Amino acid sequence: MNGQYAYGFMSALFIAIVLFTFVQRRWVQEKAALLEEKSRFVHIVENSKDFIYYCEIYPELKFQYISPSAEQWIGKGTIERSFADPQMPFDYIHPDDYELLIKKVKGELDFSKGIIQRWRDSDGTYRYFEEYATPIYENGRIVAMQGIIRNIDEKIELQKNLKYRLYHDYLTSLYNREYFEIALTRLDEKEDTPVTIILCDLDELKYANDHFGHKQGDALLQATGELLNRFSSEEIIVARIGGDEFVLLVENQTKEEVKQLVQTITEEIHMNNQNSDQTKIHLSIGYSYSLHSIGKMTKLFTEADQWMYQQKNERKQSREIGFVQQLEGETEEVCMPVE
């Protein structure tokens, strides 16, 4: 009996030892795997171009973690200064984004969307960043914030280039018809202001293309665009809206100021043609003015267009000399006010 008891005890002890050894080995293996996984995770975080942070907000503002890549974008010493002075981000953010940072700290933003903001680097240059932040709450109060921040300078530059191409003529760099139509709709439906549409048609473009090739025609378009763009301002939009058609959309100017503007354009063209040996500019101009813009823009455009083509036809009938033989250009203008 005692022998059987001893045998059973020894068997149980053996099994227990085997199980313990197996469990311990499994635990060691899992611990090693966890440590390796943690090491890989830390390596990814520490070497990522994106930077991660964790910041306490309540009871006081205090950074608990900032990944090293922050110094790659903001500058050396950023992390140390941030730990020493948690208010540093408020000094480095772009003035126009300051309120955005305040709202983030208060938890007043939509945190399901990226937060676009600009931060000043060590060179004094403001750089664009996109942040995905997660607020941490306790008892209904925001107590901390954690987030990941990525530099998006290249993305912003690409967006700017795409927007520029969307609204600018590729040849002259003036605004294009799309941009002009948007401005036209704004004045026709939303903003009531004195407005003038000045339409300009380039008389010699077909002649230049037919006799000297499209390269010379492009040069003529570029010269015309450069001349007209001198009059661009906050109140004057200059655009190329067709192959040989240009427009000046003038806001907040009187009828007398518009007449003077057209006269100045005429004088600039005359001076160009006197001083240029090759690129002579010949424009037919028609314009129309209204004291109010809402509901008037289509009528204004139509009347300016009619007067421009009337003048163009009269000039065509009276002019027999070719493009190259003309020594100086002439610009005619007509005006039909719309009250």
Image: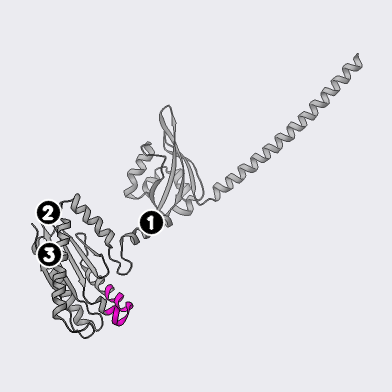
Q: Position of residue 141 (x, y in %)?
A: 40, 30
Residue 292, which numbered label?
Answer: 2
- Specify whether 181 is left or right of 111: left
Label 3, label 1: how far apart the Cα atoms are: 36 Å
Earlier-in-chain disc, 2 versus 1? 1
Label 2, label 3: how far apart the Cα atoms are: 15 Å
Identify the secondary structure beneath mark 1.
helix
Circle 3 Cα neighbour tier, 10 Å, few/some/many (<14 / 14–19 / ≥20): many
Q: Which residues are magenta?
A: 208-221
Q: Position of residue 222 (x, y in %)?
A: 28, 73
Q: Is residue 214 magenta?
A: yes
Residue under label 1, please give it: 159
Q: Position of residue 116 (x, y in %)?
A: 39, 48
Select label 2 or label 3 by which is in front.
2
Identify the secondary structure beneath mark 2.
loop
Identified by mark 1, the residue type is Gln
Earlier-in-chain disc, 3 versus 1? 1
Residue for point 16% across, 77% down: 316
Identified by mark 2, the residue type is His
Identified by mark 3, the residue type is Val
Residue for point 21% across, 56% down: 184
